[in-house]
Amino acid sequence: MSVVNVPSMWDYEQLGKAVVTQWYVKEGDDIKEGDPLCQIMAAKVTVEIPSPASGKVNKIIAQLNSEIAPGDPLADIG
């Protein structure tokens, strides 16, 4: 199992949290390294987060529209 965390892509201290705006997978889906996992919006910029590994999406931890910060868990891929 490998927990995918929110990358440090913005200045959290100045801009605050991001929001999960879309999931491209659901629990139980197979995913390949580099495939889009989810989309987040931080400081009015929308970014796709790629999967860092291939495997099965065991659990989506950060639900749609939830607020997240760099380092927070997004999903578990096994």
Image: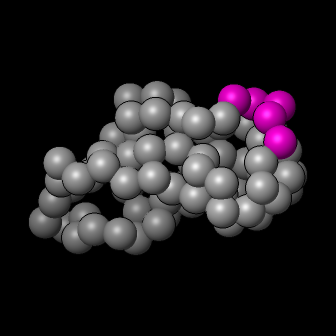
Q: Is residue 40 magenta?
A: no
Q: Quadrant of residue 12?
A: bottom left
The x and y percentages for residue 10 are 28, 68
In the drawing, does residue 59 fall left or right of residue 64?
right
Q: Quadrant of residue 56?
A: top right
The x and y percentages for residue 49 are 51, 56
Q: Residue at x 39, y 46 (%)?
A: 40
Q: Residue at x 54, y 34 (%)?
A: 23
Q: Residue at x 83, y 42 (%)?
A: 30
Most extreme residue toward the left, as rendered?
Answer: 14
Q: Can you say whether 21 is above or below 18 in the image?
A: above
Q: How many marks?
A: 0
Query: Does residue 18 appear in the picture of this structure?
Result: no
Main secondary structure of the magenta stretch:
loop
Q: Residue at x 58, y 58 (%)?
A: 50
Between 71 and 46, the residue placed more toward the observer is: 46
Magenta residues (range)? 26-30
The quadrant of the picture occupied by the N terminus is bottom right
